[in-house]
Amino acid sequence: MIHDSTAEPLVTIAVNGYKNPELLRLCLSALYRELAQVPFAYEVIVADSATEEDTESIMREEFPEARFFPFVANVGFKTLFNVSLVESRGKYIFLINSDILINRETIPALMRYLESDQKAKLVGPKQINFNGTLQLSCFRYYQPETILYRRTWLGRLPFGKRHLDWFVMKSYDHAVPKAVDWITGSAMFVEREAALRVGPMDDRFFMYMEDVDWCRRFWEHGYRVVYCPEATVYHYHAKGSARGGIFGIFFNQLTWWHIMSAIRYFLKYSRKPIPRTE
């Protein structure tokens, strides 16, 4: 097992953080604990946005073996992600947010799946809430009405509810691996060579839709994106853009970022066919 040495790691674990040093400490503590006896070499990268003094202290004093890339400004998820992609050395990269907790079998299960399916290059684990319930983390592609139904009372009407059930793949029991349109960027396990061919996340998305776009580009390159429930993680998901209900449309900056990113996404793909994923 390695963290950061001259030896080549099999897996790079790239953690993205933002203004939550205690959560980052919890994430890294669980990571090193669960990987204490694994038979493969790995390294840890931490890229942190709007880095605070407490975060720098934690990384320097408690996790010096991790490579740390702090940013003074809030550079957005995609920049942290792209830095990790460039700096990674492993054959595989496990990109996780700092609110993710892994267990000992998470990474081996994801590796086994990629090694068993030569067309799959990007896989996501099952995500579980801290109360033990399933957290939805694989979806179908957005349509313009998806944003409308998710952000307004129209989503509570029968036609809106049917559409949202379709979007979140409610009829899928999430018990068996399945090729899906996209998986959430909070936990993505990817073959590094394929990721470099697909390229970095699109700079036009500061926050939100970058994971949707990246998964779609994998499909456009002929790679499969797969939800892999044999691998599990715990995820503390705050859903900041959903705060405030319908009034969030007017007052929540995260909501506006989501809407603006969606507009950019629809404009980008307005003349492109939807890749076949099933």
Image (cartoon, helix red, strand yellow):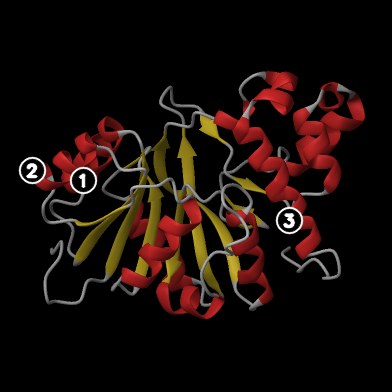
Circle 2 SS class: helix
User: Is disc 3 in contact with disc 2, using a CB cutoff of under 8 Å?
Assistant: no
- For marks 3 and 1, give the one nearer the viewer: 3
Nearest the viewer among 259 and 94 is 259
Residue at image location 26% in from the left, 30% down from the top: 22
- Left or right placement of residue 74 versus residue 57 in this view: right
Q: Is residue 7 above or below residue 245?
A: below
- Which amino acid type is marked by label 1? Glu
**C-alpha separation, residue under disc 3 versus residue under disc 2:** 41 Å
In the figure, 13 relative to 237: above or below? Answer: below
Looking at the image, tell me whether mark 1 or mark 2 is earlier in sequence order.
1
Q: Quadrant of the N terminus?
A: bottom left
As helix, strand or loop, the secondary structure at mark 1 comes to helix
Q: CA distance from mark 1 to mark 2?
A: 20 Å
Residue 61: mark in rendering: 2
User: Which residue was labeled with disc 3?
Assistant: 264
Who is closer to the viewer here, 26 or 112?
Answer: 26
Q: Residue at x 71, y 46 (%)?
A: 260
Pick whichever of labels 3 and 1 is earlier in the sequence.
Answer: 1
Amino acid beneath label 2: Glu
Residue carrying label 1? 34
Q: Quadrant of residue 19?
A: top left
Residue sitting at x 64%, y 70%: 217
